[in-house]
Amino acid sequence: MIHSVKDTQKPASIKEVAEAAGVSLTTVSLVLNGKGRISTDTRHRVQETAQALGFIPNKSAARLRSGRSLLLGLVVNDISNPFFAELSSDLEAEAASSGYLSVIANTGDDLDRQSRVIDTMIGQGVAGLVVSAASGSDVSSFARLRVHNVPYVLAVREVSDPYASFVGFDNVLAGRTAADHLAARGHRRIAFVGGPARNQNRAERLAGARDALRRRCIDLPDAWVRDGPATRTFGAAAMADLIRAAPDVTAVICFNDTVALGAYEGLHRAALTPGADLAVCGIDNVPEGASWRPPLTTVELHPRAIGRRAARALLAAIDDPATRERVHLTPRLVVRDST
Amino acid sequence: MIHSVKDTQKPASIKEVAEAAGVSLTTVSLVLNGKGRISTDTRHRVQETAQALGFIPNKSAARLRSGRSLLLGLVVNDISNPFFAELSSDLEAEAASSGYLSVIANTGDDLDRQSRVIDTMIGQGVAGLVVSAASGSDVSSFARLRVHNVPYVLAVREVSDPYASFVGFDNVLAGRTAADHLAARGHRRIAFVGGPARNQNRAERLAGARDALRRRCIDLPDAWVRDGPATRTFGAAAMADLIRAAPDVTAVICFNDTVALGAYEGLHRAALTPGADLAVCGIDNVPEGASWRPPLTTVELHPRAIGRRAARALLAAIDDPATRERVHLTPRLVVRDST
DNA sequence: CTGAAAGCGCTTACAG
DNA sequence: CTGAAAGCGCTTACAG
């Protein structure tokens, strides 16, 4: 007999469904997973019974038995960072459309926390992992994943690792694009501000910028490079410092848009106008940049695209563990009024 | 014999640990969970063996057997929304510090997706759920959680539900605070812009604003209210429209800071200066607002505090299902230059 | 202080 | 097309 779902009822298991529908556990499992040859009649009966009982399959049991799982892990620096927030959102959407639920953890860019988080995720039985590696990661950081046969995709931050796909963007090109743009506008004294010194993406952006300038016989001396956290606060402080220490600089490439917004603030405090007194170019293209005063010229990365592609690369690797791909999305210059 | 962890080795289970340490499964389980009375000697031996084998406990098995789980679910509208991104980040941190891993899913503010997502989370065996309810939710939206004995905490968006704790902020007060501030600055013609008409938080903010103004015998006519998506784009369009339709308005309360940034843009396009030609007050206090031109006056909500408190309320409810609390954080006025 | 054994809810050969 | 039974890796009374 089928009761209506009341708040006090205890959750139904596959056994209750089998009894209520008058079939075996096997049949219920087969029907609910769309496997085997089951008569249309039985199939409907089972489906309706499951529905009526409010049956929700226990995935822990399924995972334990089958070794398959519908959990996808995402390991990032900090999900409140808008870049990762957008990346996560699209990754979650892509995962959900294939029936996967997303598990998210922050590492705070700390290697120890990263390895703890990876262990936790393995323990929870994720089918695969997308990880934006903490600074200092190398192949060995992901050894446990390989031992446990958990495929993983590296995103955003590249690590030399033959076992994983990579999805990110071309940082060297991003730096080059920003520098070329400023040089084309006639700037010869260009600074570079923000980003932690040991961050590889920063190193590549800076290298790209230097390379583009070198080709035009322009030097970017270390004295005009400021490293530090990728924050608004640091951008403001570094900008203030820079205009004091190097008043002849006419343009600045910021590690990202957040730093660029800080740079605006630093300029304002010195009664200087971004875009007029000093050109500012960001990297990221956060949506709000278009509304800042002046609207920010920046190099667009594509966090959402990375989230989607990384999810797809991971699903491919789950299907076939031998799959590898390396995707470097091409950044795009967005010219507005700050340069 | 204990082998070193190689990439080709197959993952160790509790059984291998028991064999390698020369004890029973029971003992291993007891040691690793810190239960029972185990001699220091055995304890150390088991711990070292587990370590050496790179043992990671299979949580699916543990959950299946014990019914306990270390997964916390978070259900939000859209995690790429900065408000929810910050909330998530602190919720994740708080959960992680108690050993929980966070599972996140977006509903896109859709009731159907919300109930699918909740079912998925139940199936994955979450210990509890924090949910920012999709518009239109009521007690019945969470019936499955109650049937499955999964405690849940409602966050940000209030729903009349005696079974759950609530952690959010006082929206009426937020609206009142913004309106009082503008009125105190001498404004009498104040508009309200942005936010979906059916959004309860918006209704409360608007009601709070109207109430504060009414006490000062100031009317906020419907003609000065613009509803629409809480986006920058909408803010810009609505602002443009408003200055055409109601040129005598001198101040505007925006549903949130994103809309306020859009309003800035709408004003600039009409060659008007926010703060000088028309006062703009936001609600949220996104960190970047301090760097906008002019720096935005806003009413600070506390997404991170909500994330932390919601996590704590949920952990409390997991410990003792009878626990209920209702937390309404008090918004705080942040005066800058836009008003 | 330690172990043998049952059982959580599924999936999956295997048999018919 | 359908069912009986084994087993995934744990936890937990229970016994000694």
Image (cartoon, coloured by chain):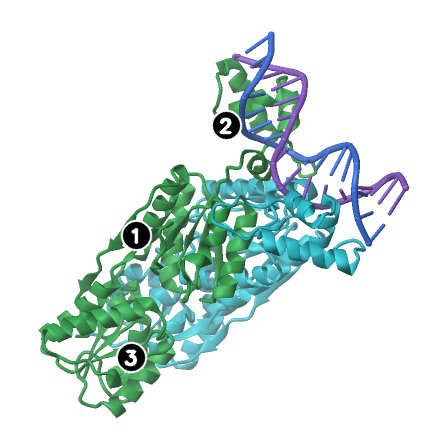
Chain colours: A green, B cyan, C blue, D purple
Q: CA distance from mark 1 to mark 3?
A: 28 Å
- In x, y percent, where is residue B20? 66, 48
Task: State which tag comes first along the sequence, 2 or 3.
Answer: 2
Q: Which residue is mark 3?
A: A263
Check the picture and name the quadrant holding the N terminus of chain A. Answer: top right
- At label 2, the amino acid type is Asn
**Crowd tier of the residue under label 1, counting other residues whose Cα lies within 10 Å: few below 14, some 14–19, many 20 or above:** some
Chain identifier of the residue bearing label 1 in the image: A
Q: Where is residue B82, by image quadrant?
A: bottom left
Where is residue A9, by image quadrant?
A: top right
Q: Say which chain tag 3 marks.
A: A
Disc 2 to disc 1: CB gap under 8 Å: no
- From the top left corner, tell me how far across and down residue A181 is, in percent: 14, 70
Q: Marks 2 and 1, Cα distance to the nearest angstrom?
A: 31 Å
Nearer to the camera, B200 or A83: A83
Horizontal side of residue B24 vs A100, given as left or right = right
Upstream in sequence: badge 2 or badge 1: 2
The answer to whether residue B142 is seen in the rendering is yes
Find disc 2 in the rendering and name its residue: A33
Q: Circle 3 sits in a helix, a strand or a loop, which is it?
A: helix
Which amino acid type is shown beneath numbered disc 1?
A: Ala
Percent x, y of residue B333? 47, 76
Residue B29 sits above or below residue A61 on the image? below
